[in-house]
Image (cartoon, rainbow, N blue to C red):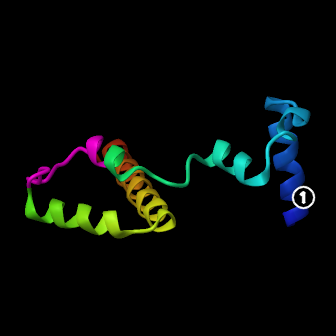
Amino acid sequence: MSCSAAAAATRAGVGELISLDLLRVFTAPELACLLGGEADISVQDWREHTTYGGGYCRASDQVKWLWRLIDRLGPDERTLLLKFTTVRAHHVVRRRVHHVLHHTR
């Protein structure tokens, strides 16, 4: 599929959900933020909503080191790190489910 065909298909799909006239009030960055979430991730919020496993906790030296590193990252780097960790976790869960479904009969 060409880029123009993909763009047309995306536009048609979005148009089925919401009037394209309503979307025209947004700039491209505003629309990207609405569709993809806020670009500048709050490290404090991220820290408060993180769950730990594998014997680690908020007070672990390794966890403290990680948060100091994350504090120094720029907004784009934090976004990429969060995407990496959440997508990776999603794939691990999918692999485990697949293994259970196909190898435990």
What amino acid is at disc 1?
Ala
Task: Identify the residue shown where x is 30% and y is 41%.
Answer: 49
The quarter in which the N terminus is drawn is bottom right
- Of helix, strand and loop, which one carries label 1? helix
Q: Is residue 63 left or right of residue 8?
A: left
Q: Nearer the viewer, residue 86 or 90?
A: 86
Residue at 66% x, 42% y is 34
Image location (x, y in percent) of residue 52 = 19, 48
The answer to whether residue 60 is above or below residue 16 is below
Q: How many marks overall?
A: 1
x%, y% of residue 6?
83, 57
Q: Position of residue 77 (x, y in %)?
A: 46, 68
**Mark 1 sits on what residue?**
5
* Residue stretch rendered in magenta on the structure: 47-59
Asked if residue 85 lies left or right of residue 32, the reply is left
Q: Is residue 52 visible?
A: yes
